[in-house]
Image: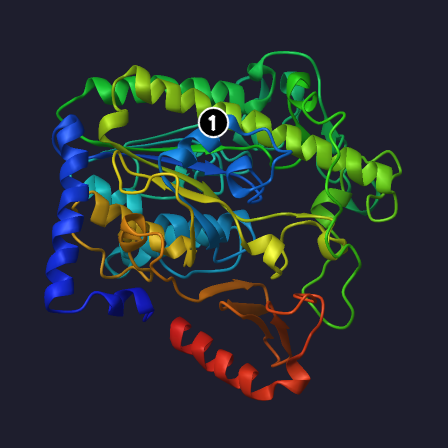
Amino acid sequence: MIVCPLKRQVGIGVFAVVWALALGGLIAEAKEGGGGSPNVLLICVDDLRPELNCYGVDYIHSPNIDQLASRGRVFQRHYVQAPTCGASRFTLLTGRYGGSGNNALFQRASRMATDGESVPPSMPAWFRQHGYTTVSVGKVSHHPGGMGGDRWDDATQPEMPKSWDRSLLPAGKWQDPRGWMHGLAHGEIRIDATKPQGGVEMDVFQSVEGPDSIYPDGGSMDEAIRQLERLADNQGKPFFLAVGILRPHLPWGAPAVDLEHYRNSKLPPINHPEKPEGRTTWHRSGEFMKYDRWGRDPRQDEDFATLARQHYAACVTYADRQVGRILEQLERVDATKNTIVVLWGDHGWHLGEHAIWGKHSLFEESLRSPLIIAPPQMDGPGKASDAMVETLDLFPTLCELANLDSPEFADGVSLVPILKDPQVSGHDAIAYHRNARTIRTNSHRLILHQDGYAELYDHRSPAGETKNIADSHEQIVQDLTQRMRDRLGD
């Protein structure tokens, strides 16, 4: 388990008494709103950069997420544990460090099958054990709907055993969860490895006229709305509803109305667009490049880069509208006053920074993502926090807000102190991918490769993560290496 400064902030004496009273008030307000334990609505958004209006980016049209931010706490410096969907969602759903690959949850499921007693319960399982009905809709774990098999629809291979009362993915016109995951308009699905070098027969982005239902998230949000109504009808039992929104995951497809917001927008320049010098976690952007790009490369074609960024932004606005739909339903069924709402991005995404179009690096752009927590009532709603926090912290935070037993097996710490006071400090952030891992502090990022090679970046310097200063700052490298090892239990 990590040792975090937040755990040491709550001591004995007068401060502890004052804090206990404050926390009791926060929990009591939630219970007074609807009676009994508060519900949880967890909204997971794929590949979402922290570029929203509520994060200070004014060209992005995100009114529904902004509205949620106005009544909650925006965490400006939230970091994920891994820059890939499966490993990041493993941490979200278990509160623990894990494997760095997309199959991390399936590996956990295999361990449960052979030695279940050695595997701590997942976050939804923990809530389920404490009397909650737990439901998942859309892409919450890595496979939408949470099943394995060739087309991700084999119910005998659950990704998260004993976690959900219902785990749902209405694939609709996209045939099955795997088709839905990479679907474009009107049921178009991706056919893999049909082109030279393993490319796919699908456009990297598109935007066509039509309602939300022409793209995959429309139908899955319809199901989430139905599930929320069903859960709210069972007023004697609290619910934990997790809703996974696919966009802006590739391929970038959104209704034409969403692209209209950006056709004439002046986008800000891409920060540090050059490929970094020396050895780094830079990669060739294979996830993006394998799609049909009509012979164009955004790393060399500024106009095409702008088009791509506009389509990404359109997908963000489409995703934002889905957030609005589920929040409207929460209000419609009169559950807002007794529901903790969380919006979480599973990792960031490079839009040309470091000459990368994708995630899968250990740079800032891959690891920083949005996090908004909105209890039913709170002090100072709408105030942002600059505290550095991690995905690991959500499990203990939600347990404390819901007044559940603390999951002592979890590796994170509760963020409730920051919900009460946005000035409370945070802690270092750890991440890993393939053969490297990183620690982010308030001032530096250290990336340590498996063979000992180090990248050290000074975030106080204008050069930021474009200049490796490891050779000239050996003591900082040693200190941060030890801090990282202590956190990971090496």
Residue 35: in sight, yes or no? yes
Circle 1 sits in a helix, a strand or a loop, which is it? helix
Q: Please give the count of numbered marks on the rendered protein.
A: 1
Q: Is residue 385 above or below residue 213?
A: below
Given residues 148 and 475, the one toward you in this image is 475
Given residues 256 and 54, the one toward you in this image is 54
Q: Quadrant of residue 244?
A: top left
Q: Residue at x 86, y 33 (%)?
A: 294
Mark 1 Cα within 10 Å, few/some/many (few <14, many 20+)? some
Q: Residue at x 29, y 17 (%)?
A: 229
Q: Is residue 46 left or right of residue 312?
A: left
Q: Is residue 213 left or right of residue 44?
A: right
Residue under pointer 1: 64
The image's colouring method is rainbow
Q: Residue at x 59, y 12 (%)?
A: 211
Q: Quadrant of the N terminus?
A: bottom left
Q: Quadrant of the C terminus?
A: bottom left
Percent coordinates x, y for residue 232 in the rendering: 24, 21
Residue 122: in sight, yes or no? no
Percent coordinates x, y for residue 41 in the rendering: 33, 33
Given residues 173 and 470, the one toward you in this image is 470
Q: Quadrant of residue 428?
A: bottom left
Q: Is residue 41 left or right of residue 296?
A: left
Percent coordinates x, y for residue 324 in the rendering: 45, 23
Percent coordinates x, y for residue 190 in the rendering: 68, 31
Q: Is residue 210 left or right of residue 374?
A: right
Q: Residue at x 77, y 73 (%)?
A: 278
Given residues 104 and 282, the one toward you in this image is 282
Residue kind at label 1, given as amino acid type: Asn
